[in-house]
Image (cartoon, grey):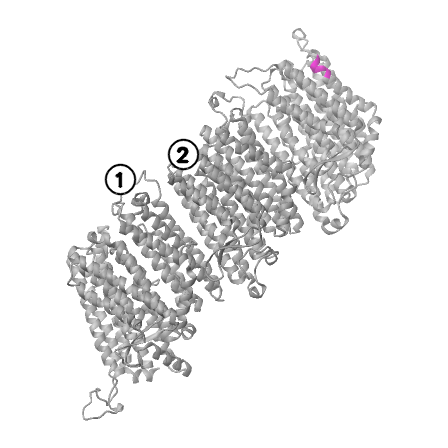
Amino acid sequence: MYLILSSIFFPILAGLFLLIRYRTPLPGEKRAIDRKALTTLTGIFLLITAALVAAALLHAKESFTLFYLTKTLPIYFRIDSVGRLFSMLAVIVLPCAGFFSFEYMKHEERESRYYGFYLLAFGVLNALCSAGNLITFYLFFELLTMTSMPLVLHSCSREAVMAGLKYLFYSLCGAYAALFGIYFLYQNCDSLAFTADGALRASSIAEHGGFLLVTAFVMLLGFGVKAGMFPMHAWLPTAHPVAPAPASAVLSAVIVKAGVLAIIRVLGMFGRDFLRGTWVQSVWISLTLVTVFMGSLLAYREPVLKKRLAYSTVSQLSYILFGLAVMQETAFTGALCHVLAHGFIKSSLFLCAGAIIYKTGKTRVEELRGIGKEMPLTMWCFTIASLGLIGIPPTGGFVSKWYLALGSLKSGMPVFDVLGPVILLVSALLTAGYLLPPVIHGFFPGADYDYGRLQKKEPCRLMTVPIFILTTASVFIGLFPDCVSGIIAAAFTGR
Amino acid sequence: MDFICNFPFFSILISLFSGTICSVLPAKAAKAVNRLVIAAVGLMSAVLLLYLLSTGESFIYWMGHFPAPWGNEIRAGVLEAGMALFFCVIMYLSMAGGAHKLPGEVVESKHSLYYILVNLLLSSLLALVYTNDMFTAYVFVEINTISACGLIMIRQVGRTIEAAVRYMIMSLLGSGLLLFGLCIMYDLTGHLLMSNIKESVALIMANGEYQIPLIVAVALMCIGLCIKSALFPFHSWLPDAYGYSTVSSAAILSSLVSKGYIFLLIKIIYRVIGFDIFNSTRIIDVLFVFGLMGMIFGSLSAIKENDIRRMIAFSSVAQIGYIYMGFGMGTQAGMVASIFHILSHAATKSLLFIAAIGLTDVSGGSRKFIDLTGAAYRNKWAGVAFTAGSLSMVGIPLFSGFISKLLFAQAAVQVEGKMLASLIVLGISTVLNAVYFMKTVIRIYTSEQDAPYRSITFRDRKGYTVVLVCSVLLNVILGVSSQPVVDMIGQGLAMFA
Amino acid sequence: MIVSVILIPFITGILVPVIPFRKRWQKEVFLETAVVLNSILVWYLLLHHSDSTFLLAHFTGNLNISFRVDGMSMVFAGLVSALWPFATLYAFEYMTKEENENVFFLFYTLTYGVTLGIALAANLLTMYFFYELLTLVTVPLVMHTLTREAVLASRKYLYYSLGGAAFAFLGLIMVIVYGSTTDFILGGVLDPAKTAGKNNVLLLIYVMAFLGFGVKAAVCPFNSWLPQAGVAPTPVTALLHAVAVVKSGAFAIIRLTYYSFGTDFLQGTWAQDVVMAVVMFTIVYGCSRAVKETHLKRRLAYSTISNLSYILFGAVIMTPLGLVGALTHLVFHAIMKISSFFCAGAVMHQTDRHYVHELNGLGYKMPRVFGIFTISALALMGVPGLAGFISKWNLAGAAVESGNPLAWGGIACLLVSALLTAVYMLTIVVRAFFPGKDFDYSTVSDIRDPNWKMLLPLFVFTVCIVLFGVYSQPIVDFFMSVAAGAV
Amino acid sequence: MGPNLLANYGEAVSAILFCIGFTNLLLQTNLIKKIIGLNIMDSAIYLFLAEKGYIAGRAAPIVVDGVTSVEAYINPIPSGLVLTGIVVSVSVTALMLSLTIRLYLRYHTLDLDEISMQLKREGK
């Protein structure tokens, strides 16, 4: 209990401490911020948090109720396999991106605010993963939006502020749609504690089955906002690119996954059996497929690298959602695998893009000719990650996509069982289409490239090491999928 | 028969007689006599009221000991005595409240004439209240008209004369109709005394003969009295008459004169025709509809008005609409509500007129709203009193207006067909009242900075202030402990039958 | 005893202009002491209440002015008396910049008494009486500045309120005539024997009375007075137009619905559908107007409009749970809104800025005020862990439980409104804390947080918001027992 | 209806006269004509009373020749009423006329509408 709590509240308190202690001085104020102390402190906090989370993951098995909001609404924590999986992702990505940002944020203003909210978001994420019922989950889901919003609008440019607000309002919109469903679930379930096989009362299903389907759909759509599902995906390509690169990495890799986690929880609450074969499933699958295809297509046409990556996130997240929507064990495995794979890959990609921006200031894809010569390590990582995202063995992406396609074919759904894999394949092709050109141009700038002006611009260790770790992790997943298959199998049954 | 039974006759007589005396007295003495007479009559009415309450039954007083059906009779019951007392109180307050304005409004030489008229008015009102004889009632209606007309025109400016002529014409139309109705009634029944007529009317209704002439007669009398009491749409004479006459006149006219006629109508309904017979005719529906229309249109006209006194005058049209709505309900409860409203409206309206004059005084004599800005700061008591009056009109609890509204609404609920209409109109009318009265109240409490007459300061007149306070108190008393009054009205109506 | 808590503010208020205070602080001490004492008295009264009715005066017939402490009055009186001392404290500081203090405090304190009168009224007539009185004593407060704008606003306020009362009056009449008594009894007092065959008329009048009382609770289309009345000094807008006055409207509607007409009579009728539709529309309408509004206080006023209808939404669900939801929001919204209004007032007092776009970057200079504002904004949005969530949860729970499809639609309205709340509140927060890259900090250089008299109430309210957010069990339990008629 | 009307021709005439007078009083704008209308109206009522009071073949109730039988005399009250009415009507007419004179002196017209117009122009 204390491990879980401390893994939640330690980063939150630490974040608040940073926010208050290192408040950005205003013009005219004498106070100056000791940057070294700030970053050191943040680093220590991050490591401690990571350690705490890891310890909690390993040891904490019990569930406990912290307190009651109202008589029947406990704030309840329980770490199950799904939560553990997401925690794993967070605990690897966040510290990496955090260390990356120590270098990256050097020239930004108001660093302390960034770190403060970064830690807050970390804490909230941990809480989200260990939430044991829908209300607790919802609580931290909202808080996640609130704490990650400052990361988006950090630069405070007009564009960033608008993007931050857009992110905020889309997320809230989704959250409220979900809340609508929660109200109804609350009345139709015995408790809001998570389960994997449906918590609806049989009598309720008999009585308002039709309306409950609507509710389920509204909830899926609502949480789908966070996961960038069509039609509420528009915030994602706006918000991710304007954030500082490490923040985009975290957003794309971890925070949007909160939406996925939410949808897994919702599916569990309603029960796959209740939803399978209904119109909800069909519509939902169609939406995910539309998103998969559309995201790739938009990414393909996008010239700005970070934006391209953001669109790619839209598309890839819907792979995961597709896997969930199929409601079949293999596909579920694929989806969860993809959660991890995509998390590592996308954070790595964003960090690479960040490193490029940091060193060269180039943001558009066509400017990146020869970049592979300038920053070889970074670009190699970028290449490997890209291959992973396309789904070339032996990277993580391959495994997950394999399972996704297999699950879909096995599911025996009409139309979608074949259509799904086809679209996934097309999208994979598009992925190759939008990720490989920077790589190719980066390493093979063409005959007219002026090698004379070439400088080594490899960033410092603080940047390269996190990128390297993340890339390795993505490959690791692909090489040894067995190490997570146990946990995924447990996740499917809700243990 | 106790000595007290002479009081009604005495009060009519001394007010009539003192009017004559006033004509030879100097202005000051006339004023004193006038006040004294009003006070004395009030005192007598009060004693009479107590007496009647203690005995619990009304009495009939033969004039010159001619027995019915030949003689002329005076009848006194609780309601009559209460009404007389109330009229005296209001009249006293109105006279006292407007006294300081009199020299400015009326030529010095006409002052004694003024008091004659007031005394005459009082006597005619008393006679209207007490008489048991229809023709006497007619005569005093005319006396009332003449003296009221005199009161209007005593302020010799073009407006008032024109208003007086208009008032006169409408009144004459009304009294002509009344007289004609009366004659037909006499023709049908052969009697002039109310109680005798009633017996005959009951016979006629029982026989089924001559019903149409009877109803025509009743209708003629009703229309006549409606015109005289300015029921919408016969109200055209009213704003000018009330708006431009002297303060006291306006207060008296609006609160008493029309009420005298209404009281006569009540007597006719109860004592001449019989309540049930009256209710069985369609006349009450007509009264009801016109009452409702009066409530709305009177208020609408008041909202449009830009002159504070005319606004208050138009408000009277609306309030008279309330009273007729109560008649139109055709129930005992409606009648009680109407009679209570007569009292409450009289108390409030005189208060408003007197307070309004206090406000216009400190605004350079102008009655335009724009000039009244901030007037309540210049004359605090008048401001407070006007506010109190307005609140009563709007029907805020604690003030008499609320009780009458309450009674009206309660009465309305009991009448199946008319319930919704009356309730809704009551609501709308309250809103409209709120609009124009609150507009004024806020206006007089608005900042003085941009007011044109900010430099005028009010010379404090003790008498005036006391009158205001008394009027407000009267209002509040009616509003707070209305139960005895309502009981008394009920008792009085019971005695009528 | 009951009367004394109403009278003490009256006497205190009247004494303020009468006693010649030499120093300002003497007056402050005097007022604050009186208000605090009265509040303590109220709480004592509420905690040691007896069931007996205190008869003050006979009106006509069977109509009395009488007082009684029951569950509802405990909620409302407790709320009002808890907030008033803080608001008074805040007003001291705020009013240093305004003129005519004495008159202000006179009516301000009178309002306290009148509001308690509404809360403690034992029957509909008494409540109606104090309800009208409330309009009258608050008008001078709205008019306080005596500018043209203030006069227009107060005029409008008067028209609306008195007009509304006129129609509420019809409801009163119905209860007098068709009820067995006018006293408040949970479940209603209508006498089935008398009402037989008159249901539709009664329902029509109920709708009218609802809208009539709804004027004070700013139900659409009778809401436009509230934003305009924002010209009043902030303590007034905060306390009266976020708590006392408007809540009196909501309180009156609850009394009318649950204690006079009775839910059994109303539930499932067309009248319920009508009022619920009106309320739902108001919820969304108020929020949308708030989003459009750029004047800070008016924006909050529109937010109040929408939130009041939350309360009414709970009330018109017409189940005990609905009442619980309504009561929860009644209390919690009061705290949240007074907190945000006080923040707005602090900003206006310290910087003289009134419009949202002028608030850029103030968060750095007034971190406490804007920190508190953020919390109240989040609470108003209904973020879990803060008070607003609990009340919305209760409301929505009641709506779901009622099984009324229209109420289900109402939940959607609540959520849309929550989203809009986020839009109009968080844009302010974002402006204050993230003013944009090219923001010129010198424009805010001489601005600072207000002194403790303003901050103390804010802190207390914030603590309450959080406290009720995480630990609302006892108070919700209490509301449950109120709704069940057990108190 | 018809025969009744003919039989009671006195009453019918008085009613018609009353209407004529009433209309004049109401609709004429000339003040003098209004007053004439008033008088016609009043006279109509007296006619009505007199008509009602008179019974053909009977005498005024003044006891001559010692005849005291009720059958011999008419009811004296209507006559008394007529007298009273005339007194009232005279005083009212006098008042109206004096008002008319005042108005004429002030505005040099007898037309009530014209006077109203002038008042409006005065603007007071």
Q: Which image quadrant is residue C417 in?
A: top right
Q: Which residue is mark 1?
A: B455
Mark 2 highlights which residue? C98
The residue drawn where x is 25% and y is 56% is B245
**Is residue A443 a member of the stretch shown in magenta?**
no
- Give how far across and how far down residue A362 sits, in percent: 63, 17
Residue B141 lies in what quarter of the image? Answer: bottom left
Q: Is residue A391 at least partly visible in the picture?
A: no
Say few, some or many: other residues with alpha carbon within 10 Å of mark 2 (under 14 / 14 to 19 / 20 or more). Answer: few
Kind of residue at badge 1 = Ser
Q: A200 or C126, which is in the foreground?
A: C126
At label 2, the amino acid type is Glu
Query: Front-most of D9 and B48?
Result: B48
**Chain under disc 1:** B
Q: Quadrant of the N terminus of chain A?
A: top right
Magenta span? A461-465
| Whether residue B99 can be seen here | yes
